[in-house]
Amino acid sequence: MAIISRLFRNISFLTLLGAFALTGSPVAAQQPSSSDSSQQDVTQTFKVDVGVVNIFFNVKDKHGMLIPGLKKEDFEISEDEKPQTIKYFTSESNLPLTLGILIDTSGSQQRVLPMEQEVGAAFLKEVLHEKDLAFLINFDIDVELDQDFTNSVRDLRAGMDKMKINTGIYGGGPGIGQGPIPVSHPKGTLLYDAIYLAADEKLKHEVGRKAIIILTDGEDQGSKLKIQDAIEAAQKADTMCYVLLIADRGFYGGSGYSGDSEMKKLTQETGGRVINVGDDQRKLRDAFDQIANELRSQYSIGYTPTNAVRDGKFRQVEIKTKAGKVQARKGYYATRNRG
């Protein structure tokens, strides 16, 4: 795994960034609004005190509706089944958001890509606020960074508009139907590699609220990494993953597709969820609306673990409330460098 990780760091995004004209904001820790001192204190504490574990989450009723207005006293939290003391709690939704949009541009997405570009751009226009940042990646036989961190909806829209379906026909260089990461497979969909790279290379060193939204049919072909590697990278980056399961039904000849099980595992472990939209533009728009509401309606809990050993192992975290069902990541890795 270490060899593969170094390979990606040395070849993939470094190659991408070297060939890509960076625009927008630099890769740096975001700062909360100075107008809200309480949020700033909490965020700065999470940034400086590496002993604090911070979990962003939603609470929903039995109909799946978000439950607002809950207080610190409404929650209990445990780590590896041992009760923890809640040190910080907030129900504010104005903390900066760092967002990665990953779009499947393999052959199976031929008929739905224009819909994804249109609705995705509208979503970014709605969800991005002044202090937020977003980046774009498309993946097929390659993983390609189309737009680095920026707050500019115009630049993000331009990045989406230039995405094209790559059916695996070689013969061009970067930007001519082929991304800058060569692979040995003539066809493929490097879904797991793309998620890993987004989390490990782009989001791991960011602070605050972070999310990856993946538009795909869930089918991976040719990734060097496994789904568990992608999950671990997202967990280590404290990043929740949402998957919009989207596909051209005609491409599959009515037989459907089978990538949803791995995508459910990814989202459940990281605190997001899968939304099946098929090839329906209305469902896609509704799904983006749901995600926007969830990202802007999060609670945040912070605690100092009773187990202070920084051994790199995974710690299971469970948040409970009698008010409803908690949607949160399943835990974190107690690594030595979480900043």
Image: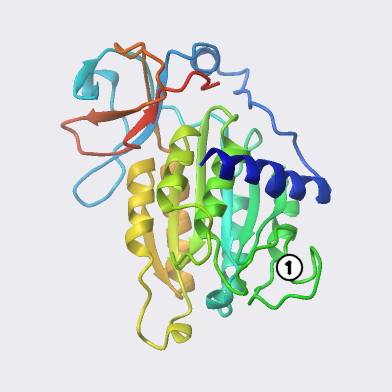
Above or below: residue 277 compared with residue 37: below
Mark 1 Cα shell of 10 Å, populated few (<14), some (14-19), many (≥20): many
Q: Quadrant of residue 294?
A: top left
Residue 334, above or below 218? above
In-front residue for pair 129/147: 147
Is residue 150 visible to us here? no
Q: Is residue 121 left or right of residue 66?
A: right
Name which residue lies at 41% across and 37% down: 297
- Mark 1: secondary structure: loop
Looking at the image, which residue is at 35% across and 70% down? 258
Residue at the image point whose x is 82% and y is 51% from the top: 19
Quick one: 165 or 74, which is closer to the camera? 165
> Which corner quadrant holds the C terminus?
top right
Give the tally of numbered discs: 1
Q: Amino acid at mark 1?
A: Gln
**Quick check: 243 left or right of 44?**
left
The residue singled out by tag 1 in the image is: 178
In the drawing, does residue 51 fall left or right of residue 269? right
Report x, y in % for residue 134: 63, 44
Which residue is nearer to you in this view: 186 or 91?
Answer: 186
Query: Would you identify the image quadrant in which residue 138 lies?
Result: bottom right
- Residue farthest left in this picture: 322
65 relative to 249 in the view: left or right: left
Q: Position of residue 93 (x, y in %)?
A: 47, 32
Residue 16 seen in render: yes
